[in-house]
Image (spheres, helix red, strand yellow):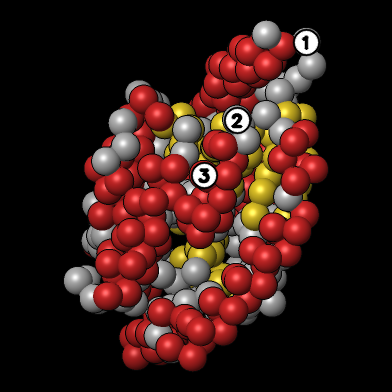
Amino acid sequence: MRPPRILRFGLFDACYPRNRTTATALALAGAELRDLHIPALADVRDRLQPSRDVSALARLGIQLLRGELRLALATPRPLAWADAVLFGYPGQWDAALWASLVRLAGRWVIFDPLVTLTETFVEDRQLVAPGSWQARWLRLLDQRALRAADLILTDTPQQAAYWAALAGVPLERFVVLPVGVDESLFHSHGHHAVEARDEARDRLSVLFYGTYSPLHGAETIVDALHRLERAGEPVSLVMIGSGQLELAVRGRAAALGLHAVKFVPWVPEVELVRWIAWADVVLGIFGATAKAARVVPNKVYQAMAMGAAIVTRDSPAIRWLAGQEEIARLVPPADPDALAQALRELQRPERRAMLAAVARARYEAVASDRARASCVRRFLEDLSLARSRRRRKANR
């Protein structure tokens, strides 16, 4: 029996980590993958601007329309090859537009959104006012895309429950697939494999990287560092990234007169590997939003894979990932005092080593490529059975 064929379809971001790690899991589980991909969003530098600027929204709409027209011209042959079509991140418009045709062709519709537009733009980033026409439109698009899918991939059970309630979709339609990492880059052999970048290695080296969205709670990190500096406790903090609240966070650090923080613009993934290797402690997220309670970000998986000590906010999602293990030092959300105390505790190398070892072992058990392949193997078997039934029916 030939392997199940999955067509990755649409205007998705081919470079985004979730899309890459999902493809890896499917391939390891035995699927054959092909892409029908139009990079319509590749030259959109600020993807948040359309939520603030009507003219930018119009330009984005034109780009999406052109991309979808190009897809329409290229679709027939790849669709005939496939057993299922996978709509990746970001793919709400693709799933809403194309799912009916895919199903009419007798193919499964698989949707891997990572996040909804509603939780990102309305609830977490608060760039769109609740109840506005934009918020209603985003919610409708989320609902149509989720309802159109035969199978929905989600990274945590908490996200599955939220999306199910948002769209009125049964939980049986969801498969939980942890985010994972690119294991060619992020692996345990890399941690502490480079020389320290700080001259003063008596300081605890702490790393944050992210998009400065409310999810990350970067202002909590700055306030925690202020408490440590005021108490004369040595910490060296590097903050990598850019985004919505970057200027506010930089301004907060300047107003507090912080000396031990270094801001670095966003860097490629290979450079992130070196920074994680430099760090004694990698910071996760600290936001108090509802989304922050439901997700485990890329950087937590990356730090786990590299065997790093992690501090992040306590949440149902991180406790689900941890099982009964202590994979990170957990603190309440938006609590700089608790974060400062956690960093004090992690001045002790033996405490960091214990957390790092448990995190790496847990990653291997539940979020490695091998473990994630086992998450999708069952539905690939169902897909193969559905294909066999379709063939038998066609031969009658």
**Quadrant of the image for the C terminus?**
top right
Pointer 2 residue:
106
Q: Earlier in the sequence, mark 1 or mark 3?
A: 1
Residue density around tag 3, few if under 14, some if 14–19, many if 20 or more, within 10 Å: some
Asked if residue 37 is positioned above or below residue 137 in the image, the reply reads: above
User: Is disc 3 placed on a helix, strand or loop?
Assistant: helix
Residue at (44% x, 71% y) in the render: 212
Residue density around tag 2, few if under 14, some if 14–19, many if 20 or more, within 10 Å: some
Cα–Cα span, label 2 and label 1: 19 Å
Q: Amino acid at mark 2?
A: Gly
**Residue nearest the viewer, comparing 130 with 369:** 130
**Quadrant of the image for the N terminus?**
top right
- Point out residue 258 in the picture as x, y percentages from the top left corner: 41, 82
Q: Amino acid at mark 3?
A: Ser
Pointer 1 residue:
1
As drawn, the label of residue 100 is 3
**Residue nearest the viewer, comparing 61 with 44:** 61
- Point out residue 101 in the picture as x, y percentages from the top left corner: 58, 44
